[in-house]
Image (cartoon, helix red, strand yellow):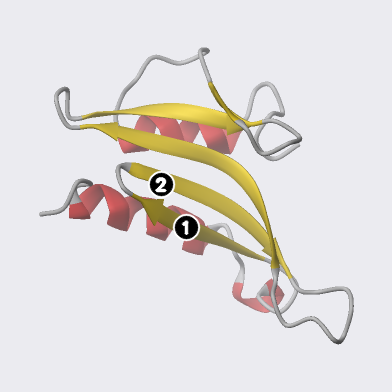
Amino acid sequence: MGAIPDLDLLKIRKYCEEKTPQEFRSEMRVEVGVRGKSVTIFECRPPWDRQETEWSRLPIGQLRYDLATAGWTLFWADRNSRWHLYDLIDPGSVEELLGEIDIDPTCIFWG
């Protein structure tokens, strides 16, 4: 097992997969990026310019795993893609934090 529990990472990947309807995958995707003990959720869009090949990636939220507590903490990105603690929910399980991103009561994640 790596720094992040495999089952939790699987849940995050499944959440992102479900946020991307099959019929819209040529127009947008929700993807996961993993770095150390952080998992970042991105909204991805195809390039506007036909010469470009890379999709743009807008950070939606980041979950950080604490090995000592076996819990997760949620962060949000400002307009400069800097991360800030989302303090409207206590650290918790992947399911709790993904639920908070999903309902997005402050419109800070999905706008």
Question: Where residue 31 appears, x then y in whole percent?
Answer: 53, 61
Q: For the residue labelled by badge 1, is the local secondary structure a helix, a strand or a loop?
A: strand
User: In the shown orientation, is residue 11 left or right of residue 2?
Assistant: right
Which residue occupies the foreground of this view, 62 or 25? Answer: 62
Residue closest to the far left: 1
User: Looking at the image, is mark 1 or mark 2 earlier in the sequence?
Assistant: 1
Q: CA distance from mark 1 to mark 2?
A: 7 Å
Question: Relative to 26, is 85 above or below?
Answer: above
Question: Where residue 109 appears, x then y in whole percent?
Answer: 65, 35
Name the residue rendered at 89%, 78% in the picture. Answer: 49
Residue closest to the far bottom: 51
Numbered label attached to residue 39: 2
Circles 1 and 2 in contact, beta carbons < 8 Å: yes
The residue singled out by tag 1 in the image is 32
User: In the shown orientation, is residue 100 left or right of residue 79?
Assistant: left
Figure label count: 2
Question: Relative to 76, is 12 above or below?
Answer: below
Rendered-image quadrant of the C terminus: top right
Amino acid found under the numbered disc labelled 2 = Val
Rendered-image quadrant of the N terminus: bottom left
**Mark 2 surroundings within 10 Å by alpha-carbon count, few (fewer than 14), some (14 through 19), many (20 or more):** many
Question: Where residue 45 appears, x then y in whole percent?
Answer: 73, 66
Question: Relative to 8, is 79 above or below?
Answer: above
Which residue occupies the foreground of this view, 27 or 32? Answer: 32
Name the residue rendered at 53%, 20% in the picture. Answer: 86
